[in-house]
């Protein structure tokens, strides 16, 4: 019974992905004529060819990789440093600061979008990678996740390193971070996935086709009257591959990091 329930749950989760891949293999006529059928009546790879020929999809793919990878690397550094200070250092107002950071998680991104755009515009970062990456340099969720993991580590490790003459940064870099590899891998997957799939921020902050990411670039196929579903699904399928590879390689650390981050 347990395996049956799990199999049904897996089928429900996989159905949208199967539909996406199947639609990418259909012709535009098949999509409208046989809209109720899951698999294509006349399979074709024309949509995959069109997504590379009709738009600079390779440039979109590279832009997305730089955007998501840059945000992930920078966020892991800033989130881990902030979480280390909140979990391992003693200073006045530490708990208040932690709760204020958590409160920001309740503020929808749409509320801060306009002031954030104005700030980026004043810095002259519109249509640049600086404007895409720097505003995402840290996240309240990442600080919370890593702080919970750091709290579970014994502080005797820090004290032993300080007795041996290690500086505070060395304790953070060589003692705490290596032990937090599962949590870092988990957060890295979250950051990479969220920014890879982000549509709104790249669409707002970029003004030229050459700076578009995969989600915002595929929006070019959404006309006012005709939406080219097959090409959109082909682009989405190609764009999904890096996320699937990243999750497969980090799955072991991902599960372990989620479990251990909630111990305390």
Image: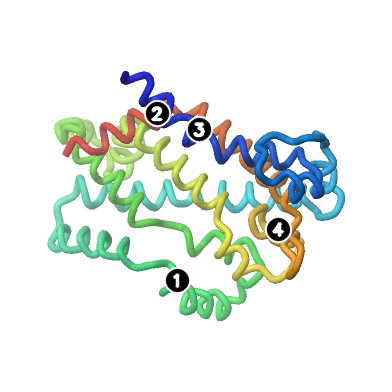
Q: Which residue is mark 1?
A: 110
Q: With 126 as the anchor, is 187 left or right in this view?
A: left
**Disc 2 + disc 4, Cβ < 8 Å:** no
Disc 1 element: helix
Disc 4 element: helix
**Disc 3 + disc 4, Cβ < 8 Å:** no
Q: Is residue 209 above or below residue 175?
A: below
Q: Is residue 175 above or below residue 28?
A: above
Q: In percent of the image, x 41 and y 57: which residue is there?
A: 138
- How busy is the neighbourhood of tag 3: few (under 14 within 10 Å), some, or many (20 plus)? some
Q: Position of residue 177 (x, y in %)?
A: 34, 36
Quadrant in the picture for residue 93: bottom left
Q: Which residue is mark 2?
A: 253
Labelled disc at residue 189: none
Question: Which circle, 2 or 4, is nearer the viewer?
Answer: 4
Q: Quadrant of the C terminus?
A: top left
Quadrant in the picture for residue 176: top left
Q: Which residue is mark 3?
A: 247
Of label 3 and label 2, which has the lower sequence position?
3
Q: In percent of the image, x 83 and y 36: which residue is there?
A: 44
* CA distance separating discs 2 and 4: 32 Å
Of label 2 and label 4, which has the lower sequence position?
4
* CA distance separating discs 1 and 3: 28 Å
């Amino acid at each position: 019974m347990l395996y049956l329930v799990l199999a049904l749950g897996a089928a429900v989760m996989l159905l949208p992905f199967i539909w996406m891949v199947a639609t990418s293999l259909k012709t535009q006529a098949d999509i409208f004529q046989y809209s109720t059928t899951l698999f294509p009546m006349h399979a074709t790879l024309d949509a995959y060819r069109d997504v590379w020929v009709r738009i600079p999809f390779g440039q979109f793919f590279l832009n997305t990789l730089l955007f998501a990878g840059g945000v992930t690397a920078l966020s892991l550094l800033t989130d881990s440093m902030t979480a280390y200070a909140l979990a391992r250092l003693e200073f006045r107002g530490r708990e208040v600061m932690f709760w204020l950071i958590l409160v920001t998680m309740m503020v929808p991104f749409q509320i801060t979008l306009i002031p954030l755009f104005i700030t980026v515009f004043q810095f002259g970062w519109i249509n640049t990678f600086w404007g895409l990456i720097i505003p995402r340099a840290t996240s309240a969720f990442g600080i919370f996740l890593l702080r919970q993991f750091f709290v579970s580590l014994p502080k005797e490790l820090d004290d032993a390193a300080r007795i041996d003459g290690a500086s505070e940064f060395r304790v953070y870099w060589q003692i705490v971070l290596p032990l937090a590899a599962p949590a870092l891998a988990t957060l890295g997957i979250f950051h990479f996935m969220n920014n890879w799939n982000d549509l709104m921020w790249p669409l707002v902050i970029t003004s030229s086709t050459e700076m578009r990411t995969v989600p915002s670039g595929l929006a070019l196929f959404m006309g006012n009257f005709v939406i080219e579903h097959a090409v959109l699904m082909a682009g989405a399928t190609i764009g999904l591959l890096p996320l699937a590879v990243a999750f497969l390689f980090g799955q072991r650390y991902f599960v372990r990091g989620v479990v251990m981050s909630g111990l305390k």
